[in-house]
Image (cartoon, grey):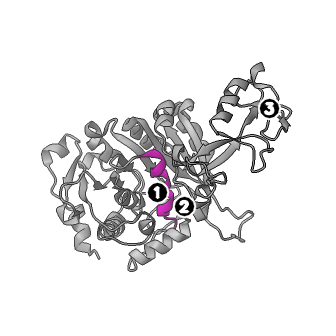
Amino acid sequence: MFTEKDRRRSREAPNDDSHSKQGISRLVPMPSLSAGTRKTENKIIHGDNERALDAMARDLEGAVKCIYIDPPYNNNESYEHYKDNDPHNVWISSVVSCVRQLRRFLSDAGSIWISIDEKQLHYLKVALDDVFDRENFITTIVWQQRTTRENRKVFSNNHEYVLLYARDYSKFKASRGLLPWTNEIADRFKNPDNDPRGPWQSVSANAQAGHATASQFYELVAPDGTRHRPPNGRCWVYDERRMRAEISKGNIWFGREGNGVPRIKRFLSETKRGITPHTLWLADEVGTNDSAKKHLLNLLPEETVFDTPKPEGLIRRILEIATLPGELVLDAYLGSGTTAAVAQKMGRRYIGIEIGDHIITHCVERLRKVIAGELGGISREIGWTGGGGYEFLRLDVSDADRGRRIKGAR
C-alpha cells in the first residue's frame, strides 16, 4: 500500500520555472508510481483535467475513439473523496467546459458517454446539444444501478443514466460494435429438417405493408396445398418470383408438416455473431454500485472506498460498443480507476486523469493488482490473467494558473 511519502512524490515533482512563468503546463513522469510494461501508451495523470488536456492537445486531437466520464452529479452531498454541492450554474459550466474541450479529441467515429442522474440529466442534455449539435445525440441509456428498495424517500430511485453523443452520428453508426450473443440467443438455432447447411432459426416472411408494392401481395401455396395470404396490413417480404426462388433453394420453412405459415430460414453460419445494443441495462447484465463497491473492498481493504463506484461490467459494455482492441479510451474524471482497469483488461489503450490524491491510493494500487492478474470484476468472464502497464505522470502547473481547477471524479 502507499504511504504519505508516495503521495508527496506525486505532489513534489520538480517545477520548471521557465515554463511556470509563461503559464505553460507540462506532464512530469513519475517512474516510482508507474507499473508494468515500461514502453506503454497508457497514461494515468494526476492533476486538473482541463490543464492536463491542454498539455496533451497536440497529440490527442482526433485520436480518441471513446471518452467516458463520470462527473460529480451536483446532488448537494458530501462524499469521502469530494464535495458535490456547487451552485447549479457553476457545476454545469464546469462540466460543459470540460466536455467542449474533450470533443476536439474524438476521432471522426468517436463517441462520449456521460454518467448522470435524473436531477441534472435534462439540463445537461440541453447544454450538450449545443456542444455536439442535436443530430449527433445517439441515445440515453437507463442503467439499473441498485436492486434494493430505498424506503426513506418518496420514490425509491433505482436507476441512473448515460448520455451518449457522437462526433459524427453516421460514422459512429457505421462503426458501432455489437454486444456478444447470450446462450439464449445461440440456443434459438436448431436444425429440425437436417439441413446440410447447419443450424438455423426462422424469421417472419411478412412485413408491414406501408411501403409495399403490388407485387408483394399474392397467394402462396404450401407444399401440402394449404393456401396462405399475408395478414391484414402486412405483405410478403419478397415478390412472388423471388419467393418461389427462395422456396426452391430450401430457404423457406413451412413447418414440420409442410402446412405452416411460411417463414424465412436464417443460418447460423451466415449470421453476424452479435446483437444490437438496447437502452435498458439491467443490474444482472452490467452490475450495480453495490457490486462495484464490494469489488473495491476486496481490492483495497485498507482504503475508504468510493460511495458510488461504477461496476466494471458497465464500462465493459460501453467499450464493447464503442471501441476495438488497441483503440484509445479517455476518462477525464477517473475516480476509483474503473475505466482504466477495464481498458487494461480488454486490451484498449487508455488515458485517465484525476485531481485527487486517491489517484495514488486507489487508482495506482488497483491498476497494479490488475496488471498482476486480479480476478475480480470482469476478469473471469473475459479470461484476464494480467499483463501490460501504464505510465504515471504529474501535471506541473504554474502558480498563476492554480486557481483554475475542476472538481475530482466520483
Circle 2 sits on which residue?
Answer: 286
Quote the CA–CA distance across marks 2 and 3.
Answer: 46 Å
The answer to whether residue 120 is above or below residue 4 is: above
Q: Position of residue 370 (x, y in %)?
A: 34, 67
Task: Verify CB contact (< 8 Å) between mark 2 and mark 1.
Answer: yes
Query: At which x and y percent is residue 77?
Result: 55, 63
**Which amino acid does the dot numbered 1 rest on?**
Arg
Residue under the point 24% across and 56% down: 394
Circle 3: residue type: Leu
User: Could you tell me if the residues under marks 2 and 3 are in contact, i.e. CB atoms within 8 Å?
Assistant: no
Q: Closer to the N terminus: mark 3 or mark 1?
A: 3
What separation in Å lies between label 2 and label 1 (alpha carbons)? 8 Å
Looking at the rendering, the stretch of residues picked out in magenta corresponds to 307-323
The residue positioned 69% from the left and 70% from the top of the image is: 149
Instruction: Using the image, tell me which numbered label, if any, was put on residue 43.
Output: none
Identify which residue is drawn at 47% across, 68% down: 306
Give the crowd class for mark 3: few <14, some 14-19, many >=20 residues within 10 Å: some
Query: Which numbered dot is residue 220?
Result: 3
How would you classify the magenta stretch by its main secondary structure?
A: helix
Look at label 2 and name its amino acid: Val
Q: Residue furthest top?
A: 214
Q: Which residue is mark 1?
A: 316
177 in the magenta segment? no
Q: Find residue 76 and report its horizontal and vertical position in percent.
A: 57, 59
Secondary structure of residue under mark 2: helix
Query: With 333 as the anchor, is 235 left or right in this view?
Result: right
Quadrant in which residue 260 is drawn? top right
Whichever of labels 2 and 1 marks the residue nearer the N terminus, that label is: 2
Q: In the structure shown, which secondary structural element does the residue marked by tag 3 occupy?
A: strand
Closer to the chain start, of discs 2 and 3, is: 3
